[in-house]
Structures are given as C-alpha cells and as structure tokens.
Amino acid sequence: MSAQSPDVDVVTFGCRLNAYESEIIRTQAGAAGLTDAVVFNTCAVTGEAVRQARQAIRRVRRERPGAKLIVTGCAAQIDPAAFAAMAEVDLVLGNSEKAEARSYLPQPELGRVRVNDIMSVRETAGHLVDGLKDRARAYVEVQNGCDHRCTFCIIPYGRGNSRSAPAGEVVAQVKRLAAQGFREVVLTGVDATSWGADLPGTPTLGQLVARILKLVPELARLRLSSIDAAEIDADLLRCFAEEPRLMPYLHLSLQAGDDLILKRMKRRHSRAEALRLIERVRAVRPDVAFGADLIAGFPTETEAAFENTLSLVAEAGLSFLHVFPFSPRPGTPAARMPQVPKADAKARAARLRAAGEVALARHLDRQVGRTALGLVERDGVGRAEDFTEIAFEGHAMAGEIVALEVTGHDGRRALARAPVLVAAE
C-alpha cells in the first residue's frame, strides 16, 4: 500500500502500526519540503518481507530514475548497511528518525545512513496524526517496542524496548478523530497489552480502554489490534462484558498450539492458558470472534507438535488466521536451532491455511440470517463488529455504519442486501 502527498510517495510493508507511521512519514516529509521522493517503510518480520522491500526499491528506481529513494522501518533499523549497500538507495533512516521532519532535510555531513540505537529511545513518537488518508477507520499508536524476547522474533531490535503513550494524549487524539467524523478507532502497538507498564502507577490497557469509552462518548466503535495471548487484564475483560462500543474481536499472537514449541519460542503462555483466555472472553461476550497468528515449521517441530497447532484452530474456535511458514531471522536464537526442512514448513503452512478456510466458512455460516452493523471500508464492502468482511449490494460512503442483512457467503466473506444507514448519535 502507499500513502501519498503531492511530492512524496510512502510505500508501506508489514503491520498496521507501520501503516499508521507511514502517515507520520508523509506528514513530516512534507513539512520538510521533500520533493520527488519515495520512502519505503519496511518490515523485518520475515525474510520474505525484506526481499519484497528490496525488490520494490529496485523496481521504483527503474521507473523513477530521478527520484530520491529513502529506506526506513524495521528492516532498515536492524540492517542499515544492507540497504546502504544498494546503489538505488539515497538515504537510510532508523525507526526513530523517520518520525522527525529534520531527517528529510539535506544534511550531507551526516552521510547516507542515519540510524541511532533504538534501545536508547524512551518515548513513543510525539507526532499524533489526525487519521489516515483514504481510510474508513483511524489508528492510534498507544505503545511501541517490546520487552519480550521470543526466540524467533527480530522486531524488538527494530522497535526497541516497550514504551507507552500517556493516557491523556491518547484520549485527546481519539476525541479529535471522533470530532472529525471517524466512527471507528483502532488502538495499535507492537505489544499493546504491555501498555502502561512504564507509566506512573502502571495502569493497564483495560483502564485505558475504559477511560476512552467514558471520556469520548461520541465515538461509535473502539477496536483493539493484535494482542498477546498471555494476558488480558481484569479491566479489559470488564470492558468486553459491559461496553458494546468495544468491538467483539481479538486477534491473538498465539504462534503455536504445542507446549514444547511454545517453550522453545519463549512464549509466555501455554496451550491451556490460551484456551482459558479465549473461554473467559467468550463467557462475557458470546458474540466475540477470534483471529490468530500461527507459525508452521518452527525449528524442532515434529509432526505431532504440528498436529497440536492444527487442532487448536477448531478447539479454540478461531475464525481468522494469519499463517506464516517459519523464516529464520539472522541474530535470533531460533535461527541457530535445528531447522525443519523448508518444504515441510511450507506444506504445514498450507495445511494450516486450509484449516483456516474451513474455520472461516464455519464462522460465515453462522452469520447467515443475521443483520450486522458494518463499517463501510469502500463502496460495496463493510466490516462487521466481529471483523467479518461483508460484500453488499448498492452503495454507501466509506466510514459510514450501515445495517446489513446477511443472506449468504462465498467462503471468504459474507454477502448482504442493500445497506440501511445507521445515523450517528
């Protein structure tokens, strides 16, 4: 995807947090007066993500030989030398530097690589954006970085240690977005459930959610992005039980369903603990849906261990899967473990995706005959409260909330009749 200003294109790879930060990049680069430039906001979660970024850089250089090409994001933070070695690249910026307008100004004395030690960063970016260009919903970065060291994950070295945005700043931003007409706001972060641990009084994510819903009554929908399956605090559970404006969907960072593999991943939850968390949320919010990230072919994974992950999909009642074949990242402990053959990892990922298709079809079956409230993402497509994608007949404007009578599905998304506009309160 890309965000654009008249003179700057921002090409985004990876997570929702990157999409949010690309809007900051667009704003800051524009403020610096940058012209005829393309900024690549990279991802480092897999080797494939890095390969795609490098491929895109080469392609854009061929298409725009005179443009200034700038590389930033997690892959650039972790391995700036690799991008600096590319003849196509004019400038490499770190994850902290990309949020500062001065980084985009000509500073030849600093050289082509401007990447500082991310572990020294102690605050979240102070640049709050007023929504995302051409998006139906707005994202708010409440947290960045991660204090955990999962053996497969390189991201802490790209994002730094966990740091939280103060609650007052978050609430003020959500209020501004609601005043601009955004009906839905998504709270996002690298490790959102750790929000508040570094703030005075160590407030919890649930307390932040409750505060937003209380102080911004005009906001129709509040949604959480991916969260750690290891924890959900009591206040957040209470919000799910009592606050219909908190959307009934959780995307969990599960990664595996086998206890030995979870231990070797250095995850903080067991299979049973993940299932209990899901049960606790479902008990107080029966209409909740769950998605999950799952890795196939983690080092030392046997067929029996994989079967434990495969069976978790149905046992946990998951509806939406993000499946990744294991990709060893240099510098991580998992890269030094005995590897599963790539062909086996790829085959297991395919089996997991097939299970995900069955799970999604089962979820969609349950939607038939219901009337869902959908946030229109683009004409003819909306997203229900439980994150179900719904294709509908007729027309509606992006950002509107409409009532959609679900008549069937195509295995990928629900199908509905013409929408009925739901007025803002």
Image (cartoon, helix red, strand yellow):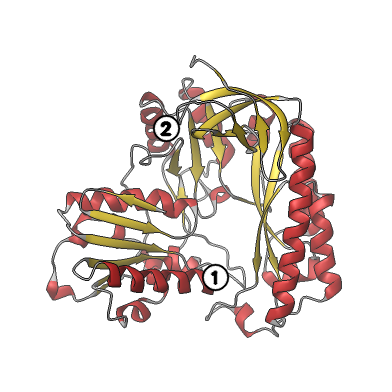
Q: Amino acid at mark 1?
A: Thr
Q: Where 258 sits versus 132, above or below?
A: below
In this rendering, would 113 be left or right of 222?
A: left
Query: Does residue 125 appear in the picture of this structure?
Result: no
Q: Are there few (<14), some (14-19), or many (20+) residues within 10 Å of tag 1? A: many
Q: Secondary structure at mark 2?
A: helix
Measured as percent of width and height from the top left, residue 246 is found at 59, 31
Seen from the viewer's position, the closer of residues 408 and 188 is: 408
Q: Which mark is residue 174?
A: 2
Residue linked to disc 1: 46
Horizontal side of 333 relative to 105 (left or right) equals right
- At label 2, the amino acid type is Val
The residue positioned 63% from the left and 30% from the top of the image is: 239
Quadrant in which residue 305 is drawn: bottom right
Foreground pick, 66 / 166:
66
| Cα–Cα gap, marks 2 and 1 | 32 Å
Asked if labels 1 and 2 touch by Cβ distance under 8 angstroms, the answer is: no
In percent of width and height, residue 46 lies at 54, 70
SS of the residue at dot 1? Answer: loop
Nearer to the camera, 323 or 32: 323
Q: Is residue 36 visible?
A: yes
Report x, y in % for residue 27.
26, 48
Count of labels shown? 2
